[in-house]
Image (cartoon, helix red, strand yellow):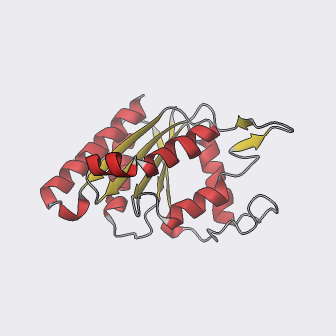
């Protein structure tokens, strides 16, 4: 059975991102798949990778559990707002601390290449933004999308990675938000059934 892991990267538990995570979860469960959720705002951890990879920082219990859930998952779903063209600090800190050498990738000795340790997993990114899609693509070159898909997930072997973005949130009304929630639930059903 497919195992879906939703990682909600919004620091506010009353956010629209929280509602999107709940809708995706509901849709995936309807498809008959197994679903687990990590709400980053509920975890206790230092998001600062203080020594880089020079010196190991011990993982907090919440991060050890997160690694176990990531390892067990076949499909990862990241839900977060796009702030300053990319992801929130809480999610970036989570990635820095959790997706470590030996877990997510492994550098090959005396080589510029690396082993991708998360092969066999797929992913979906669901992000909200206040920037129009055309402006984000033309002027920002989809910076956050490329960082998450290529420099992070593909780097660790996660493929394929599908990206869904909802915009312009600050100008949206209740009807528009309900349509986005409905679409997210449908994505959960579709991804869970694959």
Horizontally, is 1 left or right of 170 in the view? right
Asked whether 19 or 92 is in front, the reply is: 92
- Image point 60% across, 49% down: which residue? 69
* In the depicted structure, whether residue 105 falls above or below residue 18: above
Can you say whether 37 is above or below 157 in the image?
Answer: below
In x, y percent, where is residue 27?
33, 43
Query: Which residue is depicted at the point 69% across and 67% down?
Result: 60
Residue farthest along the right direction in this orientation? 110
Q: Residue at x 48, y 44 (%)?
A: 146
Instruction: Say left or right for 12 vs 70.
Output: left
The one nearer the camera, 37 or 156, is 156
From this view, report whether residue 100 is shown above or below residue 191: below
Q: Is residue 30 visible?
A: no
Could you tell me if residue 104 is visible in this image?
yes
- Residue 184: x and y, percent? 30, 46
Quadrant that contains the C terminus:
top left
């Amino acid at each position: 059975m497919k195992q879906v892991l939703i990682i909600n990267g919004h620091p506010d538990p009353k956010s629209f991102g929280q509602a999107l995570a709940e809708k995706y979860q509901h849709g995936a469960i309807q498809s008959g798949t197994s679903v687990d959720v990590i709400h980053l705002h509920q975890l206790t951890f230092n998001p600062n990778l203080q020594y880089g990879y020079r010196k190991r920082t011990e993982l907090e219990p919440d991060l050890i559990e997160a690694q176990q859930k990531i390892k067990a998952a076949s499909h990862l779903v990241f839900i977060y707002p796009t702030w300053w063209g990319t992801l929130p600090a809480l999610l970036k800190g989570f990635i820095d601390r959790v997706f470590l050498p030996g877990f997510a990738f492994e550098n090959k000795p005396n080589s510029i290449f690396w082993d991708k340790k998360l092969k066999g997993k797929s992913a979906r990114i669901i992000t909200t933004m206040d920037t129009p899609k055309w402006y984000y693509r033309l002027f920002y070159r989809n910076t956050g999308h490329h960082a998450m898909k290529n420099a992070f997930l593909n780097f660790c072997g996660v493929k394929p990675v599908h990206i869904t973005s909802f915009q312009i949130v600050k100008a949206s009304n209740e009807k528009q938000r309900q349509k986005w929630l409905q679409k997210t639930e449908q994505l959960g059903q579709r991804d869970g059934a694959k």
